[in-house]
């Protein structure tokens, strides 16, 4: 039986063992307990209404988290729709500000902090950042996600999902019209316009893949309506494509760099971290130097008996270090998948990583299915892979580990560059990061936490930090029989995380050119040209997302070190991992405060 949204939104109860160990309260404690119960009940009501409002205002997001009452609706990004969203957010925030949050349970203090951050972020995004006026990805993502979210998972019988898709297809033309009305070409960056112009037809590929072949599942009247909706959608997409090609792209004059002030504000909302931009940069640059030194030590070891190896002095200069690491990486690049076997290798790597975690008993494994798929066309062009977990209200459905296929129009040189980057050992790391014990496993654990509010507002920094943490954890545990080239590639992958943090602020604050970005990625962190070129595009299309990997993993590393110091000989790795994952993926700072019984700040 599916649990209702209302039931799931209630505050989490204390674990039974903790309740059993609590002595009977005296009169003063009973009064305090009563105050907390009343405060928790008031917060439960507020969080329920916050969720209800978000789901009503964002039907596409509601479908993604598994609430299906709004499956036939679309988000309204008109001026009136945005006004309603602002009014709702301000009202909930005012109620939250009026509460005595110190009276709440510790778990609800965490949820209140997360709720406040999201409400303030939403208001700032709409009023200050105003992506609705300059970022066409807002609309293309909604249009594609509106259909894909209904059809990709079997949360309801196919005819029911097809009817919901029909209702949404009838509304997508209005969404595309809102895009044309809202977007100011003078504010739209050219890279955003060009990317969306390439993605626009992707929504039709979703329709042709998931809907057209299944129209026979519908009754005659429903099929006729679906066919009419598809025809109308094709016409609307063609009309929108013409506007993109003839109006938006030629007139897109906006600056893709958001600048220091907006960047710093967005960074704090996105990360909920105590680290400032300057501290992130300082820490990342320190890690860059340290990791390159560790890679050189491995290079000396694997190259020492190789004919034609470069000079390997104990204390190298910059050029000697560079040459040695590059030569060692060439040994890893030599083992790579065929052009059409990337997905197959990812499947095999995922199985091997899962078997290793089970054999080493590193963390509790999921019992829900995961499937590797080709990335849908409308989502290509930003990242090579992603993990798409089912919504927290959709239980026992598949997680998708999506891999972008190599574009058919790439030259042999471009394909070779890509496969050198995504060599066989890197495919193992990708499957660890996106699959087990990374995002897929973390998403399964996080979904078990009873607060739907926390599930809906789960921290991207926690999730990305955990995924990067697991790469090192698996290498430390001896994955691939302690292969030094796997460790070398793992460190190279970690360099990418470090580079992400430096690159993001370099682009959006320091005005980096493509040449500066490519030097960081290709020379300093050993990325292949195709990977670096794609990341340069991603850095222009997004902001304050790339640092989530580095900041998240730094906080995970710091937390584990602190817990190990606290527990001493009682520290057990699997128990630690399961506990970290048991809190529903709030920002890492709150997990640390909960585990170490520190004040919630």
Image (cartoon, rainbow, N blue to C red):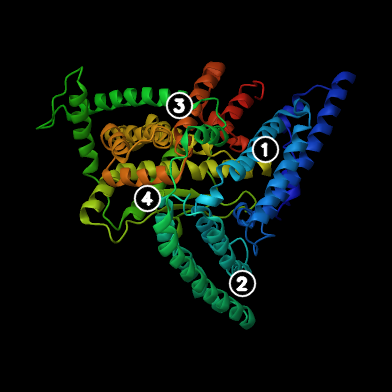
State the residue in front, 168 or 435. 168
Q: Which residue is mark 4?
A: 346
Single out the residue that lies furthest toward the left: 308
> Can you say whether 385 is above or below 515 in the image?
below
Where is residue 30 shown, x and y percent of the image?
87, 24
Q: Which residue is mark 2?
A: 159
CA–CA distance in space, label 1 to label 4: 37 Å
Q: Which residue is mark 1?
A: 115
- Place residue 429 in its image quadrant: top left
In front: label 2 or label 3: 3
Are dots 1 and 2 in contact, CB under 8 Å? no
CA–CA distance in space, label 1 to label 2: 36 Å
Local crowd size for mark 2, using a 10 Å CA cut-off: few (<14), some (14–19), many (≥20): some
Local crowd size for mark 4, using a 10 Å CA cut-off: few (<14), some (14–19), many (≥20): many
Q: Which residue is mark 3?
A: 280
Classify residue 380 as left or right of residue 6. Answer: left
CA–CA distance in space, label 2 to label 3: 50 Å
Where is residue 84 shown, x and y percent of the image?
70, 51
Local crowd size for mark 1, using a 10 Å CA cut-off: few (<14), some (14–19), many (≥20): many
């Amino acid at each position: 039986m599916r649990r209702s949204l209302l039931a799931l939104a209630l505050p989490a109860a204390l674990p039974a063992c903790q309740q059993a160990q609590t002595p009977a309260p005296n009169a003063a404690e009973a009064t305090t307990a009563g105050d907390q119960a009343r405060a928790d009940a008031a917060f439960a009501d507020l969080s329920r209404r916050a969720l209800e409002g978000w789901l009503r205002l964002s039907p596409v997001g509601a479908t993604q988290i598994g609430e299906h009452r709004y499956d036939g609706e679309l988000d309204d990004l008109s001026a009136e729709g945005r006004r309603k969203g602002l009014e709702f957010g301000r009202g909930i925030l005012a109620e939250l500000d009026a509460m005595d949050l110190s009276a709440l349970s510790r778990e609800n203090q965490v949820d209140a902090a997360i709720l406040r951050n999201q409400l303030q972020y939403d208001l700032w995004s709409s009023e200050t950042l105003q992506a609705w006026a300059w970022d066409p990805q807002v609309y293309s993502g909604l249009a594609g996600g509106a259909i894909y979210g209904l059809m990709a998972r079997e949360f309801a019988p196919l005819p029911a999902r097809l009817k919901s898709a029909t209702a949404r297809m009838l509304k997508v033309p209005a969404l595309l019209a809102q895009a044309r009305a809202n977007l100011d070409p003078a504010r739209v960056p050219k890279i955003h316009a060009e990317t969306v112009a390439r993605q626009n037809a992707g929504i039709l590929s979703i329709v042709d893949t998931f809907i057209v072949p299944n129209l026979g599942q519908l009754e005659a009247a429903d099929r006729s309506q679906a066919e009419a909706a598809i025809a109308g959608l094709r016409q609307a997409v063609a009309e929108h494509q013409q506007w993109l090609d003839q109006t938006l792209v030629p007139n897109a004059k906006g600056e893709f760099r958001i600048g220091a002030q907006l960047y710093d504000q967005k960074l704090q909302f996105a990360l909920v971290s105590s680290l400032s931009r300057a501290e992130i940069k300082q820490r990342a640059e320190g890690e860059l130097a340290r990791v390159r030194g560790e890679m050189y030590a491995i290079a000396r070891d694997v190259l020492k008996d190789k004919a034609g190896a470069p000079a390997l002095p104990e204390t190298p200069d910059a050029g000697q270090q560079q040459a040695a690491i590059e030569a060692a990486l060439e040994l890893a690049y030599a083992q790579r998948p065929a052009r059409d076997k990337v997905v197959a290798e990812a499947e095999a790597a995922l199985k091997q990583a899962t078997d290793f975690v089970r054999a080493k008993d590193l963390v509790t494994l999921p019992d829900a299915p995961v499937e590797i798929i080709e990335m849908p066309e409308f989502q290509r062009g930003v990242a090579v892979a992603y993990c798409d977990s089912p919504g927290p209200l959709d239980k026992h459905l598949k997680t998708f580990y999506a891999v972008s296929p190599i574009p058919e129009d790439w030259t042999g040189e471009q394909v070779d560059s890509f496969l050198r980057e995504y060599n066989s050992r890197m495919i193992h790391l990708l499957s660890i990061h996106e699959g087990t014990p990374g995002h897929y496993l973390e998403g399964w654990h996080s979904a078990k936490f009873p607060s739907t509010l926390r599930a809906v507002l789960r921290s991207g920094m926690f999730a990305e930090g955990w995924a990067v943490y697991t790469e090192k954890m698996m290498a430390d545990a001896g994955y691939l029989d302690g292969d030094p080239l796997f460790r070398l590639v793992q460190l190279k992958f970690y360099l990418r995380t470090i580079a992400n943090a430096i690159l993001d602020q370099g682009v959006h604050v320091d005005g980096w050119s493509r040449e500066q970005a490519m030097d960081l990625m290709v020379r300093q962190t050993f990325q292949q040209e195709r990977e670096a070129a794609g990341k340069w595009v991603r850095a222009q299309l997004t902001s304050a997302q790339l640092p989530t990997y580095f900041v998240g993993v730094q906080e995970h590393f710091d937390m584990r070190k602190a817990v190990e110091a606290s527990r001493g000989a009682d520290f057990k790795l699997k128990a630690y991992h399961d506990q970290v994952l048991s809190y529903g993926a709030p920002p890492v700072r709150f997990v640390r405060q909960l585990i170490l019984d520190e004040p919630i700040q």
